[in-house]
Amino acid sequence: MTTPSADRTTRPPVATPGGTPVSQPDEAGDRLTADERARILAKSALFNPPDAALPDGRRDLVGLSREELAAELAAIGEAPFRTKQLWHWIYHQGVTDFARMSSIARPLQAKLAERFVVGRPETVVAQTSDDDTRKFLFRFRDRQEAETVYIPDPEEDRGAVCLSSQVGCTLSCRFCHTGTQTLVRNLGAAEIVGQFMGVRDAYGEWPSPKGETPRLLSTIVLMGMGEPLYNYANVAKAMTIVMDNEGIALSRRRITLSTSGVVPMMDRAGAELGVNLAVSLHAVRDELRDELVPLNRKYPIAELMAACRRYPGASNARRITFEYVMLRGVNDSEADARELVRLIAGMPAKVNLIPFNPWPGSAYQTSTRAAIERFARIVNDAGFAAPVRAPRGRDILAACGL
Ligand code: SF4
């Protein structure tokens, strides 16, 4: 998905009162037009997953919207109220066997089982780290695989599930191991929701008959393999399912979508999903970001920051997270820290500093402890939280793909 730098907008940025340059909007809504979004969505559709039908013709009900589920049931002559009933069993109770859906009469259970399944990805590997981080390798029906990581909160009985959105990635970020793998395909909504449900199965975290639900899996971060905004349709559908109040019922405040900066789709995700936003920034000057995050050649820093400033719902309680991988001698100077502060001035923002986790063949080294501390202090002194992310699950190679 890298594009030549000639693609960069030619309209000069303007300065805000705080001094931060942003793109000038024009009446056509700059380049953030419906056309550009349509182009991204059309390209994304080329990488869609194979059909959800099993070889025996049965259809997986996981990943269908409520409307699609209602249509499937109507097609076999069932009344609309069955949709709510099935939705509850599938997403609230986590039941995969129709015979266990006790509010449904046996003849209908059998009829459903003839035509449908409630699927899960196959768990190929589940490894637990010394720090209780757990990595799952899930295999889908066409034998493609993706990783999902559960990262427990060390202080409390809860944690985040990091979901993948694609198999491979188009974006080739220089510091990212996943970026060395070409994009195979998008994950479907069923496969994205299925990762979360598969992890819930592993932790037995569905309601007990008494209705108690432990809340270990309290948040979702879309930070695994892939760029979620290059698979927007499936990601949006999956998150809509996950947020549905009668099912998994995770609030939008508990979901964070991480993007490398697909600017036109940021606006749409904000308007339609309203989930928390994380941005993989990693550099504060276009020249360097062009190299580290090649998508920057298409959507440079000024445009990215403008999209962040207008992201709906961002507030001090829901700050935008800027991810910043610390690369020794590359992006970790005091001048870089000061420029970062200038870029995010006035924004409800926090900065996650991520010590680089080297992988075989990577071109970078992690910053020194002193450099990270110096950088964090400058950002902190400007009034922004700048926690240094502790590497988790290193022994099972579950640490962030960064
Ligand atoms: S950092 Fe994210 S967007 Fe960039 S190559 Fe890695 S997986 Fe893709």
Image (cartoon, grey):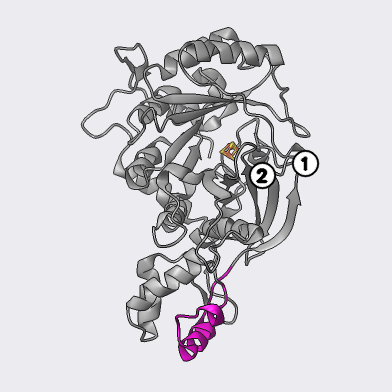
Mark 1 CB lies closer than 8 A to ligand 1: no
The residue drawn where x is 49% and y is 69% is 90
Q: Nearer the viewer, residue 233 or 214?
A: 214
The answer to whether residue 106 is magenta is yes
The x, y position of residue 144, in whole percent, is: 65, 59
Q: Magenta segment range?
A: 96-119
Residue hosting label 1: 130
Give the vertical position of 20 relative to 399 (above or below): above
Which residue is outermost to the front? 210
Q: Is residue 394 left or right of residue 304?
A: right
The answer to whether residue 73 is magenta is no
Q: Nearer the viewer, residue 112 or 106?
A: 106
Alpha-carbon neighbours of circle 1 within 10 Å: few (<14), some, or many (≥20)? few
The x, y position of residue 77, in whole percent, is: 36, 86
Which comes before the other along the chain, label 2 or label 1? 1
Query: Could you tell me the amino acid type at mark 1?
Result: Asp
Q: Quadrant of residue 139?
A: bottom right
Q: Quadrant of ligand 1?
A: top right
Looking at the image, is mark 2 or mark 1 nearer the viewer? 1
Q: Secondary structure at mark 1?
A: loop
Q: Secondary structure at mark 2?
A: loop
Q: Is residue 116 left or right of residue 183?
A: left
The residue drawn where x is 48% and y is 41% is 256
**Badge number at residue 181:** 2
The x, y position of residue 120, in whole percent, is: 60, 66
Q: Quadrant of residue 126?
A: bottom right
Q: CA distance from mark 2 to mark 1?
A: 28 Å
Mark 2 CB lies closer than 8 A to ligand 1: no
**Badge number at residue 355:** none
Marks 2/1 in contact by CB < 8 Å: the verdict is: no
Q: Is residue 108 left or right of residue 11?
A: right
Query: Could you tell me the amino acid type at mark 2?
Result: Gln
